[in-house]
Image (cartoon, rainbow, N blue to C red):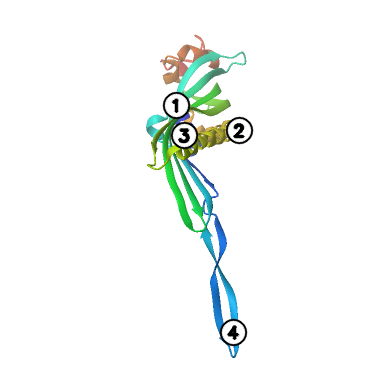
Amino acid sequence: MQGLITAIVRESLPDQYESRDHWGDTKEIWAGLDVRLDGLRIDTKRRKKQVNHGTWKLYRVRFIEPEKYLHVDVQNIRELPNGRVEFDLLADARLDVFARLAQWELGVQLISLSVNAEARAQFRARCDLGLKLDPSKLPPDVLLDPVVSQAEVRLAGFRVRRISQIGGSVARELGEEARDLLDKELAKQNQKLPSKINRQIDKNRDKLRLSVQDLLTSQWGSMAAKQLGLGDNQPAAIRGTK
């Protein structure tokens, strides 16, 4: 269950986010005259061209090896009055952040600087789980029915690793802007994160199946037996005994 939830969370989070603020903006300028002789008449036409212009900003954020660093822990398991079990999911993830600023003035680049940073994001979710027996098999399997009710990813740390040589205060401001942008993007992702995770759970229903013998002999055996309504009078085929 824990391994599957970890995989589902990885699939629900974007691998990379990119923002281009006015990146590639241009401006039309005069580039001379085209002169053409038409008989005794001289025709002139103003020539124009597009040149790079303005303040370009690029932000790129990606997860650093989520298969290595993003592992979800299951904590605070508790029984609910409705017969289901509630627990918390916690995980930390590492993010690589890159920001670049280029200042163009009518085709001439005045400034080009970049910032590299590392961020730590914390994932939290609340999930409740129901169990039921699949009577189509003997001994029956246990079907898991998890539902994520709350989920969020928040920025827990941000550290600038490198600033381009000519960066100075402008680069530090760029790093602060990158942090603010990351905060806002994570907040935007949080609005749809629970539904995205639940959709991934639905796609993996075939994997949410356990052997009843394995479950009842695990550390969760007594809790699982209670949730499934299995007691000492359960059938021998379910208990796995002869």
Q: Are marks 4 and 1 in contact (CB under 8 Å)?
A: no
**Relative depth, front residue between 9 and 47:** 47
Q: Quadrant of residue 151?
A: top right
220 or 153: nearer the viewer? 153
| Separation of marks 4 and 1 at Cα, in angstroms | 72 Å
Name, please, the residue furthest toward the bottom. Answer: 39
Q: Secondary structure at mark 2?
A: loop
Number of the front mark, 3 or 2: 2
At x 51%, y 46%, the residue is 57
Which amino acid does the dot numbered 2 rest on?
Answer: Gln
- Whole-percent x and y of residue 218? 42, 16
Which residue is found at the position 46% from the left and 15% from the top?
220
Q: Give the mark nearer the N terminus: 2 vs 4.
A: 4
Question: SS class of the residue under badge 3?
Answer: helix
Mark 3 to mark 2: distance in Å?
17 Å
Please state, as top left, top right, bottom left or bottom right, where the C terminus lies in the image.
top left
Instruction: Determine which of the numbered discs, if any, sits on residue 10 in the image.
Output: 3
Q: Position of residue 205 (x, y in %)?
A: 52, 32
What is the distance, in whole Å, between disc 3 and disc 4 at their CAs?
A: 68 Å
Q: Position of residue 27 (x, y in %)?
A: 56, 59
Q: Which residue is mark 2?
A: 191
Give above or below for 240 relative to 29: above
Which callout, 3 or 2, points at the residue further toward the start of the chain?
Answer: 3
Instruction: Kindly identify which residue carries mark 1.
Output: 92
Amino acid on which the number 3 mark rests in the picture: Arg
Q: CA distance from mark 1 to mark 3?
A: 12 Å
- Numbered tag placed on residue 42 in the rendering: 4
